Image: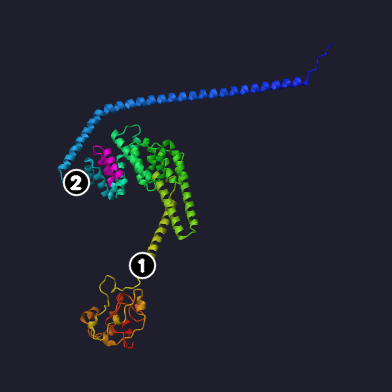
Amino acid sequence: MSTAPPISADRVQKFIEDLEAQKKIVSKCTELFTTLTNHFTSLQNSISQKSQSLDAKFLSLSSKFSQTLDSLSQRESSLPDRESAAAAHIETLKEAAFAEFKDPKGSAQLSDTLKSLARRMDSAGLVKFIVSKRKESVPLRAEISVALSEAVDPHRLVLEAFEDFVSQKSGKTLGLTDKRWACGMLVHALFPESSWKEKKGKGPEFSRNIGERAAEVVDRWKGQLDGEKEGLTPGEAVMFLHMVVGFELKERFDEGFLRKLVLDFSSRRDMAKLAAALGFDDKMGDIIDELVKNGKEIEAVYFARAAGLTERFPPVSLLKSYQQNSKKNATTILKNGNFSAAATEESKNVELNSIKAIIKCVEDHKLESEFSTDLLRKRATQLEKVKSDRKKSSAAAGKPQNKRSHSAGSARGSGPPAFRPTKAAKFSNVYPPFNRRNPAPSAQQSPAARFSAQYNYVGQNVFEAPTAPYASAYGVTHSQSPAAVTQQHYVHPVENLGVSSFPTSGAYGGQTSYVAYDYGSAAPSVFQPSSSTQ
């Protein structure tokens, strides 16, 4: 029998290596097949999605096309009625204008004057008149809307007022604040808040020429706003956005610019509705999130209510968060100020303002049943009382004290003083006047120091025989001397006397010399002050 040759190890090893190489090739082929399969699958899904999107857009376009055709047909069919209505309105305005021109006296009533200016399309006169009636803003706001309906072209009238305002704004003309306020009244009357939602799906109420002029005015206005970002007022920012909404100019501006204006001046009451009218509905959630991050929860409540996102942003939760943050801010102010008087006052003001904002927000959105404000109102009353007491104490401390006591007879503005300096010619003494030998004291010297030295009197005969006017003024006779006059002839009490026994205030206020008195060398015992002061 023959035997089989033995299998060498090298052959086995080579066989195994061949198998491993083939295994790697098969694995790579499998990976490539899987990758290609996934790629083709994703391409198929993408094509399918794009096809569905195109189908949806085609359906939407078809629907819009049919709606546009219907709208155009309706507008075309309504042209005769609108033309006849416009002609009748113009005829009415013409008759009113002729009647007004025939009546030179005119009318002084507010509504009649506004209507007259609107009929004349006098934008400059209308702005000037509105500025002159600024104190009557409440009735003025209602009458402007009625007056604009009397104009032939209300949009052109308001636009001309804004053109004048923007041109004067570039020239830094005086009185821009009043004109800005008047233009704000006009644009609010022309485009009320109720018209913002009604405009969706409707064509503009103004001509294409007016729209182009409005775009030019707003473009120039934006250039001015870019140069004065620090001085931009909230009222002007609201007016700008109001014009953009009213004349449908949103597409002409960058969305980031409009959004920044909304966020920077979100505290304005009508800013939330303006943001919704600008078409930020799908992005209002992001705006509200940013307001909450910046600590403006009160503004976030208004924006959430305007956008219909109260379920996502509950107003009560936002109010509680704002209240907690306000307390933290007040405490931080106290700590940073080392609990000083100024820090305490600032802390209380921050707390009071936050309480008022919360109460106002609750009232505006009728959240009393969900958020009680009783404790907040009590706390606000306490803070108001403390603030009022502090103002009264500050006013009392800052009031200058009257250093001189005035009696009833020597009150300021009540007549001549009780004791007047007499003239030297009326007395029979040979001594020169006191002010010639002793000059008047300086302005810095107090009255008490002026009479603090010991005086010597010549004698009683110096005071005798006064003149009739002098005697009648004090109710004494010619033979009476001041030494003999009792206390009832003097209006000053004893405690007002100085060291020299003369009154230091009141009747002697401002008296710098006694020209008839001679304080020479007489003994002080001749004249006793106690006889007239006790």
Q: Around disc 2, counting alpha carbons within 10 Å, would you say few (fewer than 14), some (14 to 19), or many (20 or more)?
A: few
Helix, strand or loop at disc 1? loop
Cα distance in 3D space between marks 1 and 2: 53 Å
Check if residue 446 falls in the magenta segment. no
Q: In the picture, which quadrant includes the C terminus?
A: bottom left
User: Which of 444 and 403 lies nearest the eye of the viewer?
Assistant: 444
Residue 346: tell me if it is visible: yes
Residue 41 picture location, percent across and down: 54, 23
Residue stretch rendered in magenta on the structure: 139-167
Mark 1 crowdedness (10 Å alpha carbons): few <14, some 14-19, many ≥20: few
121 or 385, nearer to the observer:
121
Q: Residue at x 41, y 38 (%)?
A: 255
Q: How far across and down, in percent of the image, does residue 339 sit?
A: 48, 59
314 relative to 394, above or below: above
160 in magenta: yes
Q: Secondary structure at mark 2?
A: loop
Question: Compared to 83, does 443 lie above or below?
Answer: below
Kind of residue at badge 1: Pro
Would you name the residue on which mark 1 appears?
A: 400
Residue 276 on image: x %, y %: 39, 38
Residue occupied by mark 2 = 107
Q: Residue at x 25, y 72 (%)?
A: 415
Q: How many marks?
A: 2
Counting residues from the start of the chain, the first of labels 1 and 2 encountered is 2
**Residue with the most extreme right position:** 1
